[in-house]
Every structure is written in C-alpha cells, then in structure tokens.
Image: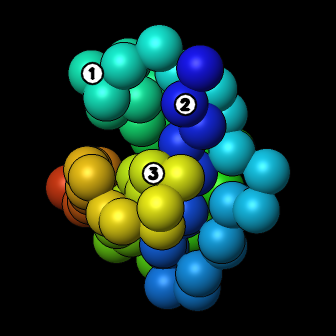
Amino acid sequence: MPRYFFDIHDGSEQFDAEGVECATIEAACKQAKQVLPEIALHELSADGDRKAYTVLVRDEQDSPIYSATLTFVGLVLKRHA
C-alpha cells in the first residue's frame, strides 16, 4: 500500500517523516481533509483570531499531490464594559 506524507504549515512548518499508508490518492486527500479541523482545534492561536492551517500531501516520490487549507477568523462583535 502506498505511503503518503502530511506536512503541516501554520506559520511554521512541520514535515511528516513517517507518513500514513492509504489505498488511493483519494483516500490520502480525504485523510488531509479530516486532519485539518483536528489540528485547528488543538492548536488555536493564542496570539489572535486569525490563523490558516495548510496540509500538503506528498507521495513516496516526494511529489506534492494535494493541498488543503482551513482558515480560522474570529471577530469580537461586542465588548463588555
């Protein structure tokens, strides 16, 4: 089964050296879509209400095959006195 690598970019870069086995490219793309909300949930920015999380999927030949980005934007609508 082919191995795919999921690099995380969120202002810093975290390169995946281990990878995950996925049956197809489509399965690897689905894995990337599933991991993005999990990353955002656990790594919400403490320094503001704007953050973008990108997963870049590479194949065993180190070629990029898919990229997905999730953007978080928070906005305070009313301040308490």
Left of 50 or right of it: where is 1? Answer: right
Identify which residue is drawn at 47% across, 61% down: 61
Q: Give the colouring mode of the picture.
A: rainbow
Numbered badge on residue 59: 3
Question: Does the rendering let one see residue 27?
Answer: yes
Q: Which quarter shows the C terminus?
A: bottom left
User: What amino acid does circle 1 point to?
Assistant: Glu
Identify which residue is drawn at 76% across, 62% down: 17
Q: Label 2, on which residue?
A: 2
The image shows residue 71 at horizontal and vertical percentages of: 27, 57
Compared with 29, 58 (above or below) is below
Neighbourhood count class around disc 3 (C-alpha, 10 Å): few under 14, some 14–19, many 20 upward? some
Q: Nearer the viewer, residue 35 or 44?
A: 35
User: What amino acid does circle 2 point to?
Assistant: Pro
Q: Secondary structure at mark 3?
A: loop
User: What amino acid does circle 3 point to?
Assistant: Asp
Mark 1 to mark 3 CA distance (whole Å): 12 Å
Numbered badge on residue 26: 1
Left of 74 or right of it: where is 32? Answer: right
Identify which residue is drawn at 45% across, 51% down: 59
Numbered badge on residue 60: none
Point out the frontmost of discs 1 and 3: 3
Point out the frontmost of discs 2 and 1: 2
